Image (cartoon, rainbow, N blue to C red):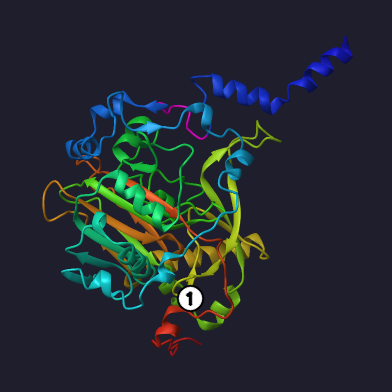
């Protein structure tokens, strides 16, 4: 009798049982809060609050929203265990760095623009008079290089379908398809960026007073949205390269997004400190949590990945500081006290130097058209603002092209070094 019971227990491993329970229960889901209202598949409730301009863009593109919007991956496809989640896109595949094929002068792209506006000295350029949907391959290569140099590039007054946005992302790399978050129906890889919907369905409870707390200790005070400085998808084996966010519903005022340059953050450091950081590696975690197969009752665990702390951009060859407050947890080889101290300083360099940042107001100059931002996650951090407090609609779609395995080239230069700009340290001791 005893041996039969033992055999039965061995026949159904505990992790399989837990997986079955989670997949078959409508009340339990991994990676969400107990009070979250998770709708798998298309959501009829979301459709009720979808802004008119967004609805028109989706319908014009032939997206089927008849049963609801947005769409969330089916529960049977959402990973339960952290090893399953980490195994997604763990395979080897060829990545083509399109920026490397570009004409260094970018004549086809810049020559076709009515205006090229450098919004700040170190980061952010707006191209006027171009439609992203009409770019030739040559122009797309040149745009990839412009983004690699200027970190983020903006296009207002765009008529851009989510289908075309996905196609553009596929040109620049392998498009990330998130296993959990909301996407445009029928278009996996086109992620929905819609804080109002998150507020309604997830137990986010964001208010004017509480939504920025993560900037002090993002692990202890969990981020309630994208209002904390971060870099997208750093837990991937090949983290995000170009990310394209297109907003089709924009508040009259507010809802700006900020970016900060990783090239410039690196160049803010003393030459001595740069030498100390060069070649170091750090641990990066995922935003979503999953269960540990060996300790399924231990609570959610994040995917962990090791990447260089300073990485070299494959197209520009410039070094960039690759850290962010919400997802870089420790520097390998240092004590936890040393690591915390140094990481917090590096986060501050990125977040507090206004001269290496750009703040963008999304508003198009013509109603009915959307605005796009395309940035390189390898060399930046970003955050949004929520000053409109959900009173004005803000909705968009995001497509992320994953890039190369991050590398640090010890012979590479910093941006200022490569451009021959001053690295004077006259006030340093
Ligand atoms: Fe983001």
Quick check: can you spot residue 5? yes
Rendered position, 95 above or below 73: below
Q: Which of the pair 3/348 is nearer the observer?
A: 3
Magenta segment, principal secondary structure?
Answer: loop
What residue sits 43% from the left and 27% below the top?
Answer: 35
In the displayed orientation, state which residue is furthest to the left: 366
Which quadrant of the rendered structure holds the N terminus?
A: top right
Q: Is residue 390 magenta?
A: no
What residue sits 24% from the left and 72% below the top?
Answer: 110
- Which residue has dot 1 on it? 317
Q: Is residue 427 left or right of residue 259?
A: right
- Count of number-bearing discs: 1
Q: Which of the pair 206/312 is nearer the observer?
A: 312
What residue sits 62% from the left and 26% below the top?
Answer: 19
Residue 120 at x, y percent in the picture: 27, 72
Q: Is the CB atom of the residue marked by disc 1 within 8 angstroms of ligand 1's nearest atom? A: no
- Quarter occupied by residue 216: bottom left
At mark 1, the secondary structure is loop
Residue 338 at x, y percent in the picture: 62, 65
Q: Is residue 35 magenta?
A: yes
Q: Where are the magenta residues, as a range? A: 31-39
Quick check: can you spot residue 360? no
Residue 364 at x, y percent in the picture: 16, 54
Pointer 1 local density, CA inside 10 Å: few below 14, some 14–19, many at least 20? some
- Quarter occupied by residue 352: bottom left
Residue 162 at x, y percent in the picture: 30, 44
Rendered position, 97 above or below 253: below
């Amino acid at each position: 009798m005893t041996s039969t019971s033992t055999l039965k227990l061995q026949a159904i491993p505990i992790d399989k049982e837990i997986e079955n329970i989670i997949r078959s229960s409508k009340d339990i889901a991994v990676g969400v809060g107990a009070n979250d209202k998770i709708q798998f598949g298309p959501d009829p409730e979301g459709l009720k609050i979808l802004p008119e301009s967004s609805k028109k863009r989706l319908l014009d593109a032939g997206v089927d929203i008849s049963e609801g919007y947005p769409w969330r991956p089916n529960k049977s496809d959402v990973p339960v265990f952290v090893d399953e989640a980490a195994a997604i896109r763990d395979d080897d595949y060829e990545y083509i760095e399109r920026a490397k094929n570009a004409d260094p002068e970018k004549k086809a792209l810049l020559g076709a623009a009515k205006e090229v506006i450098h919004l700040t000295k170190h980061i952010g350029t707006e191209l006027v008079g171009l439609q992203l949907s009409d770019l030739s391959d040559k122009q797309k290569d040149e745009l990839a290089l412009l983004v690699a140099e200027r970190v983020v590039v903006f296009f207002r007054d765009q008529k851009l379908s989510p289908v075309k946005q996905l196609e553009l992302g596929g040109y620049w790399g392998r498009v990330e398809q998130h296993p959990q978050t909301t996407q445009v129906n029928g278009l996996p890889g086109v992620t929905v960026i819609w804080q109002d919907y998150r507020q309604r369905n997830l137990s986010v409870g964001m208010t004017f007073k509480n939504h920025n707390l993560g900037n002090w200790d993002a692990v202890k005070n969990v981020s309630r949205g994208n209002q904390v400085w971060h870099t997208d998808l750093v837990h991937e084996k090949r983290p995000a390269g170009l990310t394209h966010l297109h907003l089709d519903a924009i508040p009259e005022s507010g809802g700006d997004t900020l970016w900060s340059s990783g090239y410039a953050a690196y160049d803010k450091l003393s030459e001595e400190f740069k030498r100390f950081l060069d070649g170091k590696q750090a641990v990066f975690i995922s935003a979503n949590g999953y269960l540990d197969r060996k300790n399924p009752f231990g609570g959610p665990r994040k995917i962990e990945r090791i990447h260089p702390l300073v990485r070299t951009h494959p197209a520009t060859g410039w070094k960039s500081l690759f850290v962010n407050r919400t997802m870089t947890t420790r520097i390998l080889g240092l004590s936890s006290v040393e690591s915390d101290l140094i990481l917090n300083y590096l986060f501050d360099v990125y977040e507090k130097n206004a001269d290496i940042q750009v703040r963008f107001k999304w508003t198009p100059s013509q109603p009915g058209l959307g605005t796009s931002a395309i940035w390189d996650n390898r060399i930046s951090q970003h955050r949004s603002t929520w000053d409109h407090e959900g009173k004005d609609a803000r909705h968009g779609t995001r497509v992320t092209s994953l890039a190369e395995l991050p590398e640090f080239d010890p012979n590479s230069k910093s941006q200022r070094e490569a451009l021959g700009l001053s690295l004077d340290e006259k006030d340093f001791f």
